[in-house]
Amino acid sequence: MSKSFTHDGVESNGSAYVVQRASVSSKVGLLIFALCLAVLLSAPLWAERSGLRLVVEFACYLALAQMWNLLAGYAGLVSVGQQAFVGLGGYLLFILASKLGISPLIALISAGVLAGLLAIPTAFVVFRLKGAYFAIGTWVVAEVFRLGLAQATFLGGGSGQSLPVGVVKQLGPNRELLIYYVAVGLAVAAIMAIFMTLRSRQGLALTAVRDSEAAAGSLGVDTSRIKLAIYVGVAAFTGVIGALLFLQKLRISPDAAFNLQDWTAVVIFIVIIGGIGTLEGPLIGTLVYFLLRGALSGYGPIYMILLGVVAVGMMLWMPQGIWGTIQNRFGWQLFALQRKLRPAAI
């Protein structure tokens, strides 16, 4: 009996199979994603300035959530110190643009690259720690950066500094429009970068590490190397987001740049609500967070307490998050990441 193979196929007992990625739900998800992107790209034509600023904030939080989800949800590196790279990105932007005279857009990318390089020595420290100790270690690193920059008098010390008018003028008269498109681009880039990573061989290795690091190591996966690559890559991308955030704000200070609540606690909340370890989870979580913030912000000091109650309730009754629960129950996927074998058509 002759055997036939396809490019994606495997032969089993004389029957050819092919790997199927796309599904009905993923095709619908692709259409929804394209429509949402079209709406966002056209928003400056019809939306008000306050709405565009809200979209910028939404896009930045979505990108931060996607990065933390990649780090914790797939690589198993639960960090509570990602504010370190948000702050580093912001400060590096100010140094490059105001002190060295580099164009703000070039400084934006350069800040991310430098943040990634600075993550390498910190990785050699925190990677010696495991579990809760790793999480605490990342927070300590962030505090070291915050306290160190608070002593840098040439950067304004503890009170911080504003971006010089000359640097702001380099962005042109449509500064807010430019920042809007860069923010949307970063959010889309974060999603697509993770999507392409998870569909690659490295993504398979990363998924194996998430499921069982010991088993992945026994199969030849260099777990330390792939975790280091993810940690540094996430730090670099987070640095770019941080640079954009403070380019929009035009002012930076150590307490604002390295704020645990704004840049890490909220991001963790978003991922937990949406569904950790899923590409769709941060999308759902960011939307839910902004809806809750709008509904609960009028309650003053108890606003964060209410968010905490929601998070604890989700962890108790829906530990896999909103999208994780939906995915397990209905098998839906908005992004074609799952691999399924089906008989090849004869």
Image: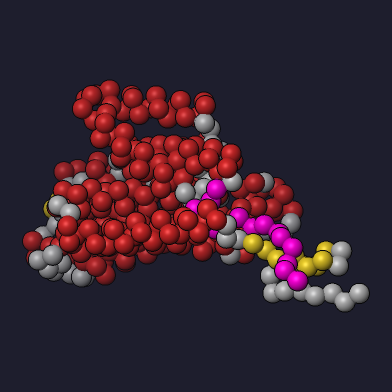
Question: Residue 332: x percent and y percent?
Answer: 55, 48
Q: Give the camera-side residue of 247 and 270.
A: 270
* Residue 231, visible in the rendered structure: no
Is residue 128 positioned above or below 168 on the image? Answer: above
Q: Quadrant of the C terminus?
A: bottom right
Left/right of residue 77 with respect to residue 252 in the rendered view: right
User: In the displayed image of the protein, which residue is found farthest to the front?
Assistant: 346
Q: Quadrant of the N terminus?
A: bottom right
Q: Residue at x 78, y 68 (%)?
A: 16
Q: Residue at x 33, y 24 (%)?
A: 305
Q: Give the camera-side residue of 165 and 147.
A: 165
Question: Residue 57: x percent and y percent?
Answer: 26, 49
Q: Residue at x 24, y 30 (%)?
A: 297
Left/right of residue 319 with respect to residue 117 in the rendered view: right
User: How did the renderer colour the structure?
Assistant: secondary structure
The stretch of residues the image draws in magenta is: 332-346
> On the image, which quarter does residue 256 sit in?
top left
Is residue 272 positioned above or below 184 on the image? Answer: above
Is residue 40 positioned above or below 127 on the image? Answer: below
Q: How many marks?
A: 0
User: For the stretch drawn in magenta, what is the main secondary structure?
Assistant: loop
